[in-house]
Image (spheres, helix red, strand yellow):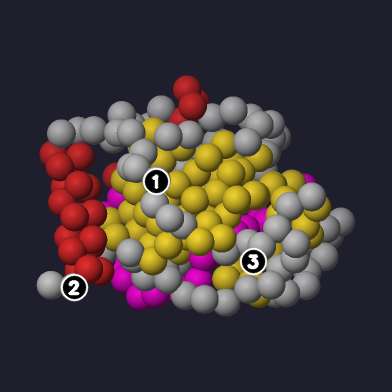
Amino acid sequence: MNHRSIRRALGLAVAFLLAAAGGRGVCEQPAALALEPIFNGRDLAGWQPTESPMWRVEDGVLIGENDAALTGSMLRTEAEYGDVVVEADVRFEGEIDSGIMLRKPEIQVQIGISSSLKRDMTCCFYTGRYPETGLAEGVNERLRPGEWNHFRVEAVGDTFTVWLNGKQVAAYTDPKYAAPGPIGLQVHPNRAMKVEFRNVRARRL
């Protein structure tokens, strides 16, 4: 068995044990991995589109802000990822609607207010709907509006897990989202909003 297969098996075993223990929302974030920056802090190199009026970089921070027409925009990495861990510091306040996207077909970790449900669904999984088994728990106790919040998202096989500020808050299993895809960040259309990202890093597993 190669190293990638071993890591994948370990990740699935941990997810299984957490689910069996009913540990959603109480699990400590795993020990730090050596993640690689996928945002260089200077420009949009490595992302598509490489230039966008709704995405800019200021003082090492990636800022997504809607235009006057509320057009919305998706910013995606040029590289594609299958089994992966993604981490980022995210800052926002108000009724924003954003997210971190993974895989093909695309699965989203919500950040902010759902445009369809009109309520905060931060850290919940969105698949065209919000599946009951992908809803987050304990977010209100951990989220710091207007401050930097640390998000960690893992995709291992058919299991997806989210940590917020060091605690697991959601886990979702679905074999549909299997193919490698880019990592995406969202500015939602029809919403006056601003979201900031820094220390955006990832590592293939």
Residue bearing mark 3: 75
Our reading of the magenta stretch's main secondary structure is loop
Camera-near label (1 vs 3) is: 1
Q: CA distance from mark 1 to mark 2?
A: 22 Å
Question: Where are the magenta residues, as a range?
Answer: 172-192
Q: Residue at x 57, y 55 (%)?
A: 200
Q: CA distance from mark 3 to mark 2?
A: 33 Å
Badge 2: few (under 14), some or many (20 or more) residues near its Cα, within 10 Å? few
Badge 1: few (under 14), some or many (20 or more) residues near its Cα, within 10 Å? few
Q: Residue at x 58, y 44 (%)?
A: 89
First in sequence: mark 3 vs mark 2: 2
Q: CA distance from mark 1 to mark 3?
A: 26 Å
Residue bearing mark 2: 2
Quarter of the figure that contains the C terminus: bottom left
Left or right position of 39 against 161? right
Along the viewing direction, whichever of 31 and 15 lies nearer the viewer: 31
First in sequence: mark 1 vs mark 2: 2
Residue bearing mark 1: 32
